[in-house]
Amino acid sequence: MADEREDVYSKVVRAGKRTYFFDVRSTRGNDLFLTITESKKRLHEDGGTSYEKHKIFLYKEDFEKFMDGLQHTLDELERIREHGAPHREERDPSAEGNDHPRTPESFGNVDFDDLGKP
């Protein structure tokens, strides 16, 4: 079976221990979508290396909302750097409409290295 996706454009961004790949691809129907891949080099105790990859697929119907959310977040990040703590309550991204506040008690400790392990 032939690959249904065709590479249209790629951009590689190296950032310390991580590399980000921004790949624009097209479907058989010529719809464009974006994949964002984070690749992180892992060193093993035996001296070997491997690469851990995480991928996000972003489809055309979500481009505008994604960009709006990213720009809003980057603006807020810059505001926090300049002025301190957020001016509003943290929001639960899994909540419908994203308008349900999260309290510090609702946050859990997450070891991101363990995500995806059985």
Image (tube, rainbow, N blue to C red):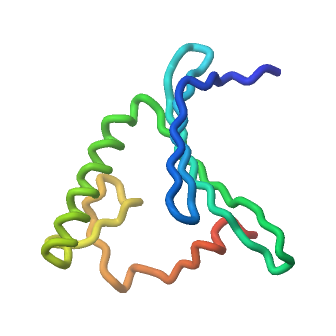
Residue 113, image x, y percentages:
63, 73
Residue 69, image x, y percentages:
30, 49
Image quarter where the N terminus lies is top right
Count of number-bearing discs: 0
Image quarter where the C terminus lies is bottom right
Q: Residue furthest right?
A: 46
- Residue 66 in the image: above or below residue 90: above
Q: Residue at coordinates 76% horizontally, 62% vertically from top-left? A: 50
Q: Residue at coordinates 39% horizontally, 36% vertically from top-left? A: 62
Q: Residue at coordinates 48% horizontally, 38% vertically from top-left? A: 58
Q: Residue furthest bottom?
A: 105
| Res. 92 image quadrant | bottom left
Q: Is residue 13 left or right of residue 86?
A: right
Residue 108, image x, y percentages:
47, 81
- Residue 20 in the image: above or below residue 5: below
Residue 114, image x, y percentages:
66, 74
Q: Residue at coordinates 70% horizontally, 68% vertically from top-left? A: 42
Q: Return the residue nearer the eye: 97 or 68.
A: 68
Q: Return the residue nearer the eye: 80 or 96.
A: 80
Q: Is residue 59 left or right of residue 53?
A: left
- Residue 69 in the image: above or below residue 99: above
| Res. 100 image quadrant | bottom left
- Residue 108 in the image: above or below residue 6: below
Q: Return the residue nearer the eye: 42 or 72.
A: 42
Q: Return the residue nearer the eye: 26 or 104.
A: 26
